[in-house]
Image: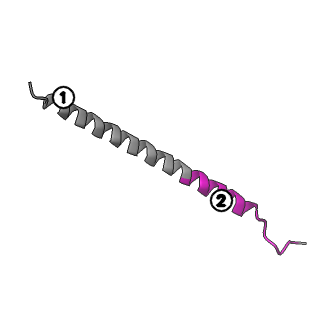
Amino acid sequence: MVSVVPSLWGYAIAGYVMTAGAIGLYVVALHARARRARDRAAAIAGRRRTSTPP
């Protein structure tokens, strides 16, 4: 006899996959943001080093 109620395992696995994907994208975005901040800080420090009055 075939069960009328579908298995919920597919939904659980899909939920885990979607959550892992979202967390992965979030981590990638954090690394990109940190890289931009580091580059910006280096640019500001470089301008300060070259524009210091004698």
Looking at the picture, how far across and down is residue 25, in whole percent? 49, 50
**What amino acid type should be assigned to the residue bearing mark 2?**
Gly
The local crowd at label 1, few if under 14, some if 14 to 19, many if 20 or more residues have their Cα within 10 Å, is few
Element type where label 1 sits in the image: helix
Q: Which mark is residue 4?
A: none
Q: Looking at the image, which is closer to me, 52 or 18?
A: 52
Quadrant of the frame with the N terminus: bottom right
The local crowd at label 2, few if under 14, some if 14 to 19, many if 20 or more residues have their Cα within 10 Å, is few
Identify the residue under disc 1. Answer: 49
Magenta stretch holds residue 13: yes
Q: Is residue 27 above or below residue 4?
A: above
Which residue is at 28% across, 40% downward? 40
Looking at the picture, how far across and down is residue 44, in whole percent? 23, 37
Q: Looking at the image, which is closer to me, 41 or 11?
A: 41
Which residue is at 79% across, 66% downward? 7
Looking at the picture, how far across and down is residue 2, in whole percent? 86, 72
Magenta highlight range: 2-22
Q: Is residue 44 left or right of residue 33?
A: left
Q: Is residue 33 above or below residue 41?
A: below
Tell me which numbered mark, 2 or 1, is placed earlier along the sequence: 2
Report how many numbered discs are placed on residues in the image. 2
